[in-house]
Amino acid sequence: MKVSIFIFSIFLLFSCSKQSEKKLVGTWVVERVEIKDGAGFVYYDTLFETNSNTVTFSQDSLHALVCFQFTPLASSFEVSDTLVLNSKWSKSSDLIVLSNKNYSLKLELLSNNQLVFNYYDYSKYRLKTFFLRKI
């Protein structure tokens, strides 16, 4: 009896993983970017050309071009930044592992029409969180 429950739970675990991969496939538009700097301050983006800020997952590749800017605290200038991804990808637990990058994207939320992921940009000491809607 215990063996059959164990086998069933493993089957359920793997089938749920495949379901979430299927949810990722498609084109997503970025609605907002949140940037948290090394000192803990949070900034919200101003997206350039909202319609062109998309992330597209196919079965084996990920393409993204997101251009955004924000104004750091006590500053009179805006900082421009981009996220450019062209990579093969795989899903492992709550991570999207990119084959040609030295970082992974952490999934915070994934539903049929909403996606939230983040990654830490070590070169700029910033945690960048992206809020997306499926189109």
Image: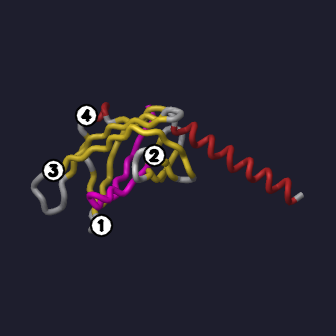
Q: Position of residue 83 (x, y in %)?
A: 32, 44
Asked if the residues shown at circle 4 and circle 2 are in contact, with their CB atoms under 8 angstroms apart, the answer is: no
How many angstroms separate mark 4 from mark 3 (CA)? 16 Å
What main secondary structure does the magenta stretch of the protein show?
strand
Residue at horizontal 57 percent and vertical 53 percent from the top: 93
Amino acid type shown at disc 3: Glu
Q: Which mark is residue 78?
A: 3
Q: Answer with the quarter of the image where residue 47 lies.
A: top left
- Judged from this view, the residue extending furthest toward the left is 76
Question: How far apart in space, not on screen, are marks 2 and 1 (Cα)?
Answer: 27 Å
Disc 4 residue crowd, few under 14, some 14–19, many 20+, Cα 10 Å: few
Picture coordinates of residue 77, whole percent (x, y): 11, 52
The Cα atoms of the two marked residues, 4 and 1, are separated by: 28 Å
Q: Which residue is mark 2?
A: 98
The boundaries of the magenta stretch are: 117-135
Marks 4/3 in contact by CB < 8 Å: the verdict is no
For this orientation, the residue located farthest to the right is 1
In 3D space, how far apart are the residues under numbered discs 3 and 2 (Cα atoms)?
29 Å
In the image, what residue type sits under mark 2?
Answer: Leu
Q: Earlier in the sequence, mark 4 or mark 1?
A: 1
Please tell me whether residue 23 belongs to the stretch shown in magenta.
Answer: no
First of labels 1, 3 by sequence position: 1
Which label number is shown at residue 49? 4
Q: Amino acid at mark 1?
A: Gly
Report helix, strand or loop for mark 1. Answer: loop
Task: Give the position of the N terminus as an image quadrant.
Answer: bottom right
Front of the two marks 4 and 2: 2
Left or right of 119 in this view: 68? left
Would you name the residue on which mark 1 appears? Answer: 40
Q: Is 133 one of the magenta-colored residues?
A: yes
Q: Earlier in the sequence, mark 4 or mark 2?
A: 4
The front one of 48 and 104 is: 104
